[in-house]
Image: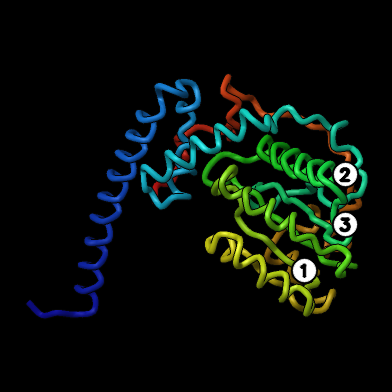
């Protein structure tokens, strides 16, 4: 038989199809095994396959590592109880406007706006604890707004306007590093705008602490404000979903959004909206 480019391509397609089917079956078996290994301790939680898949993906479908991660998350949730944090508990942090939810991207992923210039390092253990509570409060609020799979993630818009040395907080960098363990596969992308030379130092430090997969999701917008605003409306969200400062037309900046906690089972696991029918196995 004569070997042509077309025949090679068709053969490649067949192999790819077989691989996809085998991978799907393997992932399905792993998900079933994962659910079974946790069912005795968390009978209600394992019904949410979307959550389980996120833990498996975060550990590259390594069952023992995914189970360890899941149990660590459950211990953390029972100890910290982030879903019980009330708006009044973090109102002082909310009033700074340093982080709030505003708009969605074209796939309905909620956008978290972070204004780095509005954050100052906490003084003392109480201040650090307050910052942690605020981070968990913001994340729990975001979990309640996630769209169904496969877009059940968030977009972070990290604005470094007015950022200087006084806003740099190494403890917060470390605190954010834990989010990958407690909210796995939740961040779709992080857009860092108005980056300057100081950001290079920040990124170098973060690279030693944060997960490489997370670091790959960082997109740095090192350009003029005019160029940034144009790019934002083309690549991140529509003008209706962006603030004027970011190229949009929205004036609805209001960090004082009421907190609507997600529906939680008895073991306090944050349930991600949706069912497993839309899960894309990788």
The residue at 59%/47% (across/down) is 186
Q: From the viewer's perspective, tell me whether residue 40 is left or right of residue 234.
A: left
Q: How many neighbours does mark 1 have within 10 angstroms: few (below 14), some (14-19), or many (20 or more)?
A: many
Q: Which residue is mark 3?
A: 120
Q: Nearer the viewer, mark 3 or mark 1?
A: 3
Q: How many neighbours does mark 3 have within 10 angstroms: few (below 14), some (14-19), or many (20 or more)?
A: some
Quadrant into which the N terminus falls: bottom left
The answer to which of marks 3 and 1 sits earlier in the sequence is 3
Instruction: Work out how far the residue at label 1 is from the one at label 2, CA to CA, in angstroms.
Output: 22 Å
Mark 1: secondary structure:
strand
Q: Nearer the viewer, mark 1 or mark 2?
A: 2
Q: Which residue is mark 2?
A: 93
The residue at 37%/38% (across/down) is 31
Mark 2: secondary structure:
helix
- Residue 87 place in picture, x, y as percent: 84, 32
The answer to the question of whether label 3 and label 1 lie on touching residues, with beta carbons closer than 8 A, is: no
Q: 214 or 69, which lies in front?
A: 69
Position of residue 270 relative to residue 120, above or below, is above
Instruction: Work out how far the residue at label 2 is from the one at label 3, CA to CA, in angstroms.
Output: 11 Å
Q: From the viewer's perspective, tell me whether residue 171 is left or right of residue 271.
A: right
Which disc is residue 193 wearing?
Answer: 1
The answer to the question of whether label 2 and label 3 lie on touching residues, with beta carbons closer than 8 A, is: no
Would you identify the image quadrant in which residue 116 lies?
Answer: bottom right
- Residue 72 place in picture, x, y as percent: 52, 38
The residue at 81%/69% (across/down) is 229
Which disc is residue 235 wearing?
Answer: none
The answer to which of marks 2 and 3 sits earlier in the sequence is 2
The answer to the question of whether label 1 and label 2 lie on touching residues, with beta carbons closer than 8 A, is: no
Q: 193 or 63, which lies in front?
A: 63
Position of residue 258 relative to residue 54, above or below, is above
């Amino acid at each position: 038989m004569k070997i042509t480019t077309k025949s090679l391509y068709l053969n490649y397609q067949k192999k790819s199809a077989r691989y996809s089917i085998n991978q799907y079956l393997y992932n399905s078996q792993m998900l079933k095994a994962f659910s079974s290994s946790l069912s005795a301790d968390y009978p209600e939680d394992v019904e949410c396959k979307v959550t389980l898949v996120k833990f498996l993906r975060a550990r590259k479908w390594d069952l023992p590592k995914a189970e360890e991660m899941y149990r660590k998350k459950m211990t953390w949730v029972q100890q910290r109880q982030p879903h019980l944090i009330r708006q009044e508990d973090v109102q002082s942090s909310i009033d700074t406007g340093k982080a709030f939810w505003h708009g969605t991207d074209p796939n309905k992923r909620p956008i978290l706006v972070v204004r780095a210039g509005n954050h100052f390092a906490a003084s003392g253990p109480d201040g650090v604890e307050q910052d942690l509570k605020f981070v968990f409060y913001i994340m729990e609020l975001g979990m309640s707004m996630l769209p169904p799979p496969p877009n059940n993630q968030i977009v972070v818009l990290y604005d470094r306007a007015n950022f200087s040395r006084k806003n740099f907080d190494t403890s917060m960098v470390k605190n954010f590093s834990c989010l990958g363990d407690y909210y796995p596969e939740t961040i779709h992308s992080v857009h860092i705008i108005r980056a300057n030379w100081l950001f290079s130092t920040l990124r170098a430090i973060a690279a030693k602490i944060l997960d490489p997969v997370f670091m790959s999701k960082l997109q740095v917008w090192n350009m003029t404000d005019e160029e940034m605003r144009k790019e934002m409306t083309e690549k991140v969200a529509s003008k209706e979903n962006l603030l004027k400062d970011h190229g949009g037309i929205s004036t609805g900046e209001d960090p004082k959004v009421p907190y609507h906690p997600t529906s939680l089972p008895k073991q306090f696991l944050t349930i991600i909206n949706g069912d497993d029918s839309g899960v894309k196995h990788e």
